[in-house]
Image (cartoon, rainbow, N blue to C red):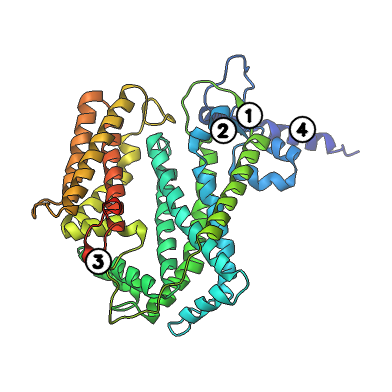
Amino acid sequence: MPLSRGPLRRAGKAAGRSGHPRSRLVRTAHRCRRRRLAGPAPPGAGRHHDPAGVARGKAVVKRAGPQAGLFFHLHPARVAASSLRPTATLGLGILSAVLFALLALSGTLLTLYYLPTTSQAYGSMLDIQYLVPLGGFLRTVHRWAAHLMVVTVALHLLRVVACAAYRGRARNWFIGLGLGASTLLLAFTGYLLPWDGRAYWAVRVSTGMLDNLPLAGGLLRGLLLGGDSVGAATLVRFYAAHVFFLPLLLLLLFVWHLWRLRRDGGLARPGEPEQLLPARPHLLVREAALALAACAVVASAAWLWPVELGAVIDTVRPADPEKAPWYFLGVQEMVSHSTLWGALLVPGLLTVFLAALPFADGAGRYTGVWWGAGRRRSLLAAVALLALLVMATCLWLEWRQLRPAGIHPSAVMTILALLAGVAGWLLARSRRAALLAFFVVMVVALGGFTLAGWWRGSGWRLLLPWAG
């Protein structure tokens, strides 16, 4: 009489669940990695402590409901209480995401009426401005959201450097740099689409600065313009990049950025034990409130300060002065002083600095703390004050037309940044202090040069607003 195979199958399944010794080692390694990413356990937490909520993430999602799956896929299940403070991140990441959503929504509606040809683009903008119901308001919302997104992304980069949040997260740092570059390109390609005189000359000046780059400058300019000058091919390329390629790239990088942040255990913070709270509702409520506030600010700005369409393009009589978009004014100002320093040395030095930062400052104390602590903050405050004084002196000499011909402000500020980095190393004996000192001077310099470009008047003469 044959025996039943049921007990044998159950025994085989039980043996499979027990697993090979190597499988147990792999599971143990994954568990240790999750605990390491989550940080140390607070006192009295016990051996089953799970700070980041990684082990209990599926259970949390199940209790919250299937509608919360995306939220928990891009956020840790549990967050540190210190990460919820407004000063931890200033909400810059969620602000950038909300502004991008506003851009996507308003831009989609604008594409229903916009015609991307040189003969019809300006006319379609007039229709949007004056004939389409709420068309002018919608266009103004789109413009304000674009400008504010450039600001919030730049401030987010500044916050990451100031808090050393790149430590141990080099991959996510480079994803963030890609997000910053994509944001600038998205704003720049959209700047041309109104096809008015202001947009035409701004794009012509900006792309003309590429000619100062050795080797690849002319090639990049040709790829952007589709020819030797701004024309029909340029408008089509900018339109395609603005409405499809760049938004898609930015969306993919944004999701990847959030996913990497979750995999790395949430926001970078000091290693001290601290209280952990469920992401829902604590983080979700704060993000929702910030999103509503951002929408209210953009709508109010669009209502109070509407954006007017510029004059028709006149290729015979250029604008005086010809200016790049405001986020490139600092580079244009430096190029006006010296092509070598403004177009090559300063941008190249900043690019190398940002690329090498996670490796030059890969470990140390005060991770997640603004500008370090104690003596380092005093040192950086002194460096910032000195940089402001030197920058103000350069602007005053330029305004009075007393600047010596061989002295370039961009060279002066770059040398000052290098000296500040050396001083930071000698005084604090810290690579982080040296890197931050260099970074602070360069931020002050870029801000000063952007203001100088903003204040340029007819004939590229510097006109300080308070001087009449």
Amino acid type indicated by mark 3: Ser
Could you tell which of marks 3 and 2 lies nearer the N-terminus?
2
Question: Disc 3 versus disc 4: distance between alpha carbons?
Answer: 88 Å
Could you tell which of marks 2 and 1 lies nearer the N-terminus?
2
Residue 207 lies in what quarter of the image?
bottom left
Could you tell which of marks 4 and 2 lies nearer the N-terminus?
4
Amino acid type indicated by mark 2: Leu
| Vertical placement of residue 465 versus 369, above or below | below
Q: Nearer the viewer, mark 2 or mark 1?
A: 2
Answer whether labels 2 and 1 touch (C-beta < 8 Å). yes
Check disc 3: other Cα within 10 Å, few if <14, some if 14-19, many if 20+: few
Could you tell which of marks 1 and 3 lies nearer the N-terminus?
1
| Vertical placement of residue 58 versus 306, above or below | above
Residue corresponding to mark 4: 11
* SS state under label 4: helix
Q: Nearer the viewer, mark 1 or mark 3?
A: 3
For the N terminus, which image quadrant?
Answer: top right
Amino acid type indicated by mark 4: Ala
Question: Disc 3 versus disc 2: distance between alpha carbons?
Answer: 48 Å
- Residue found at x 30% / y 39%: 440
Question: Picture coordinates of residue 40 (x, y %)?
Answer: 53, 22
* SS state under label 3: helix
Residue corresponding to mark 3: 458
* SS state under label 2: helix
Residue corresponding to mark 1: 277
For the C terminus, which image quadrant?
Answer: bottom left
| Vertical placement of residue 170 versus 186, above or below | above
Q: Nearer the viewer, mark 3 or mark 2?
A: 3
Question: Disc 2 versus disc 1: distance between alpha carbons?
Answer: 9 Å
Residue corresponding to mark 2: 84
Amino acid type indicated by mark 1: Leu
Residue found at the far front of this picture:
468
